[in-house]
Image (cartoon, helix red, strand yellow):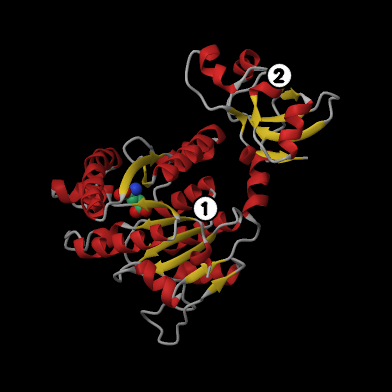
């Protein structure tokens, strides 16, 4: 099963799982959910949790009604609620000795390569430090035009950026049904979806998820992003205790199957930008290292052509001026001019600040 085999898993939990209609925090549920996470950790999975709840918990603290909030007020409320949310998580997860970190993301962070690459590295470093990132949208800063507004699509972008194998959207329904199960007794849960065709679009518009900003529509949008990122996605019922254990044991949910492999998706993302902004000429030693799947280090760089910024798409050329690969640069062209030919341990001395050592990371490179 997809979740079993996944190395990196993103789990999205909606506000309605954390706080009920009477504005009571579902402490017991959260304690059980923590056990689910502990279970996944035992199998050495990298985990990211995307959690809503900042606005709901902010409203609870201020005794406000979420429905009547204007945007500017809701931004202040989210800023108040986010700390409540993290305190709640910290209290529950610490009891199980699970370390947490927090990342607040805006739409721009996920859409701009440079920031997306940075976010990917941060996730990787947090995994190797043994911390679980809790992600939410930076609601206090994002304005309506540049806002996800729902954490379903945000979670799918996070899954894409982190190179996750699997995204679980924990909702208040079991998944996508052929008809509305609240009205029609013959409604059947759809277990697997390969193609989001007109039929799926139609039934997802008709079905409702009671709470949350998203409903089914944003979950289908999230599935489309996942399908093109090589990531399996499930819509599953989060209201029950131990929802992850339930997926593992019953597989009762709707799975969306990716259309491309993760590797192909990433390669496409790397070279999908506008034409390359510059080129790096490398020596034979570096060429061999790259052929063996290594990252490009400064030591093997002979020359840099063109002006580019961090995260820009550039060509990697051998000494005979033959293009070997394309990649996303972790340094600007000016920085590379200063560090080319130098050993990695001299980079911070030459630039005057700490940086990464790979000029182009192997994961950000596609051989042509
Ligand atoms: N980011 C919002 C919050 O933390 C929730 C968005 C959503 O409901 O999907 O309150």
In the displayed structure, would residue 205 be above or below residue 355? below
Which is closer to the viewer, label 1 or label 2?
A: 1
The answer to whether the residue labelled 1 contacts the one labelled 2, judged by CB atoms less than 8 Å apart, is: no
Identify the residue shown where x is 71% and y is 34%: 289
Q: Residue furthest right?
A: 320
**Residue corresponding to mark 1:** 164
On the picture, is 181 further left or further right than 261?
left
In the displayed structure, would residue 254 be above or below residue 85? below
For the residues labelled 1 and 2, the Cα–Cα distance comes to: 33 Å
On the picture, is 119 further left or further right than 69?
right
In the displayed structure, would residue 261 be above or below residue 285? below
Name the foreground residue: 319 vs 344. Answer: 344
**Residue corresponding to mark 2:** 306
Few, some or many residues within 10 Å of mark 2 (<14, 14–19, 20+): few
Identify the residue shown where x is 37% and y is 81%: 183
Name the foreground residue: 38 vs 116. Answer: 38
Name the foreground residue: 209 vs 101. Answer: 101
Q: Earlier in the sequence, mark 1 or mark 2?
A: 1
Few, some or many residues within 10 Å of mark 1 (<14, 14–19, 20+): many
Q: Position of residue 182 (x, y in %)?
A: 36, 79
Q: Find residue 231 and report its image quarter.
A: bottom right
Quick one: SS at disc 1? loop
Identify the residue shown where x is 49% and y is 53%: 156
Q: Position of residue 60 (x, y in %)?
A: 17, 51
- How many numbered circles are shown? 2
Quick one: SS at disc 2? loop
In the displayed structure, would residue 103 be above or below residue 335? below
């Amino acid at each position: 099963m997809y979740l079993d085999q996944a190395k990196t898993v993103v789990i999205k939990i909606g506000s309605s799982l954390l706080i009920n209609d009477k504005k009571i925090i579902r402490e017991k549920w959260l304690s059980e959910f923590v056990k689910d996470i502990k279970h996944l950790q035992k199998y050495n999975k990298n985990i990211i949790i995307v959690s809503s709840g900042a606005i709901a918990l902010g409203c609870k603290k201020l005794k406000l009604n979420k429905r009547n909030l204007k945007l500017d007020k809701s931004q202040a409320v989210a800023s108040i609620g986010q700390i409540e949310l993290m305190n709640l998580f910290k209290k529950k997860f610490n009891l199980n000795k699970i370390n947490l970190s927090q990342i607040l993301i805006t739409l721009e962070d996920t859409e701009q390569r440079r920031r997306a690459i940075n976010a990917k590295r941060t996730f990787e470093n947090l995994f190797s430090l043994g911390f679980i990132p809790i992600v939410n949208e930076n609601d206090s800063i994002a304005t309506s035009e540049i806002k996800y507004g729902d954490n379903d699509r945000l979670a799918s972008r996070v899954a894409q950026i982190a190179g996750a194998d699997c995204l679980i959207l924990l909702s208040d329904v079991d998944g996508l049904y052929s008809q509305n199960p609240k009205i029609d007794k013959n409604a059947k849960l759809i277990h697997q979806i390969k193609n989001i065709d007109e039929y799926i679009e139609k039934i997802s518009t008709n079905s409702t998820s009671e709470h949350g900003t998203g409903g089914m529509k944003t979950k289908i949008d999230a599935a489309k992003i996942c399908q093109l990122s090589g990531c399996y996605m499930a819509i599953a019922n989060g209201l029950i205790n131990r929802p992850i254990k339930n997926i593992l044991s019953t597989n009762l949910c709707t799975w969306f199957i990716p259309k491309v492999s993760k590797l192909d998706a990433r390669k496409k993302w790397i070279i999908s930008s506008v034409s390359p902004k510059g080129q790096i000429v490398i020596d034979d030693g570096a060429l061999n290292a790259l052929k063996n799947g290594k990252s490009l280090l400064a030591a093997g760089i002979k020359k840099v052509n063109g002006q580019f910024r961090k995260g820009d798409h550039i060509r990697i050329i051998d000494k005979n001026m033959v293009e070997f690969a394309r990649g996303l640069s972790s340094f600007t062209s000016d920085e590379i001019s200063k560090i080319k030919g130098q050993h990695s341990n001299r980079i911070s001395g030459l630039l005057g600040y700490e940086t990464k050592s790979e000029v182009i990371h192997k994961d950000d490179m596609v051989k042509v």
